[in-house]
Every structure is written in C-alpha cells, then in structure tokens.
Amino acid sequence: MQVILNQDIKELGKKGELVNVSDGYAKNYLIPRKLAVTADATAMNELKNRESSKAHKLAVEKANAEAAAEKINGKTVNLTARAGTNGRLFGSVTTKDIAEKLKSDFGVAIDKKCLTVEDIRSCGTYECTVKVYTGIVAKIKVMVTEA
C-alpha cells in the first residue's frame, strides 16, 4: 500500500515522501496515529502542489541571490578605522563591519558568517569572498583607510 508520510519516521522516510508499506502497517499503525495518509488522488495532487511550490520558492531564492551577487561582484567597500603608527589599526575590521557596510552602500543584506576574509589589522586593500547562496560566490575588495 502506498502512503504519504505526515512526519519523519525512522527507517521509513521523511515528511512528504511517498512510500510503500504493508497494508497492516498502514491501516493499524500509521494512519490511526496520523503519521501518514493513503496515497489517493487528492493526496497525490496535494503532494505535487507542495513539491512544485517548494521548487518555485527555491528558484526565486536562487534568482535573488544571483542578482545580489551581480550587484556586489567586483565592487570595493571603503571602511575607515582608527590607526596608530605605520597604519596599524587599534583592533581590527571584522566581517560584521563589512556586512553592515555592504547593506548600507549596496542594499544587499549578507550574513557575517558568509564572508571570508583574512585578518584585517592594518590599513590597505584586502580580497573578500562572499558566499551569497549555495554555489553562488562573489568577490569584493575591502579598502581600509585611516580615520
């Protein structure tokens, strides 16, 4: 008997999957406990609609991420920080600072965990890699000047 799972079930499958189980297991355990529903025409149609909705949502997210990556790729972010002698900073420039500057300058909200840059402890220009989405990466330059 084919059923559509309403919850993740260990050894059987994840929520929303169509699985084959024995008739007794489905009728006596899964369906009475609301862990699954029989795979009739309406349930199958609902499953297809959910899957297409999820695919559309992922496509929209990916398109937005590509647009954001295109917007910031190759750009330069200018930051100012207090520095001492020889251009050595008091403290450092963090990924949080870079993410805030990206949001204010380009209107692109990037999580600080998605930024990869070496330790910035002196004035100069640094390369930064921005992971916008899975498989979508942009490269920016971070220019640190003395305040």
Image (spheres, rainbow, N blue to C red):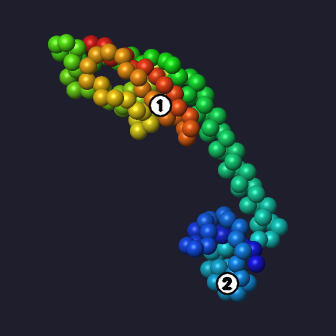
Residue closest to the eye, 136 or 33: 136
Vertical side of 126 occupied by 114: above or below: below
Vertical side of 48 occupied by 60: above or below: above
Asked which secondary structure carries label 1, the reply is strand
* First in residue order: circle 1 vs circle 2: 2
Residue, far right: 41
Count neighbours of disc 1 (C-alpha within 10 A) and say few if under 14, some if 14 to 19, many if 20 or more.
Answer: many
**Residue 7, visible in the rendered structure:** no
Residue closest to the eye, 19 or 26: 19
Vertical side of 136 occupied by 46: above or below: below
Residue under the point 49% across and 18% down? 75
Residue 128: horizontal and vertical position, in percent? 42, 26
What amino acid is labelled 2 in the image?
Tyr
In whole angstroms, how far apart are the C-alphas of marks 1 and 2? 49 Å
Which image quarter is the C terminus in?
top left
Q: Name the residue carrying label 1.
A: 130
Residue closest to the eye, 68 or 127: 127
Which image quarter is the N terminus in?
bottom right
Checking the image for residue 25, the label placed there is 2
Count neighbours of disc 2 (C-alpha within 10 A) and say few if under 14, some if 14 to 19, many if 20 or more.
Answer: few
Is 41 on the left-hand or right-hand side of 6?
right
What amino acid is labelled 1 in the image?
Val
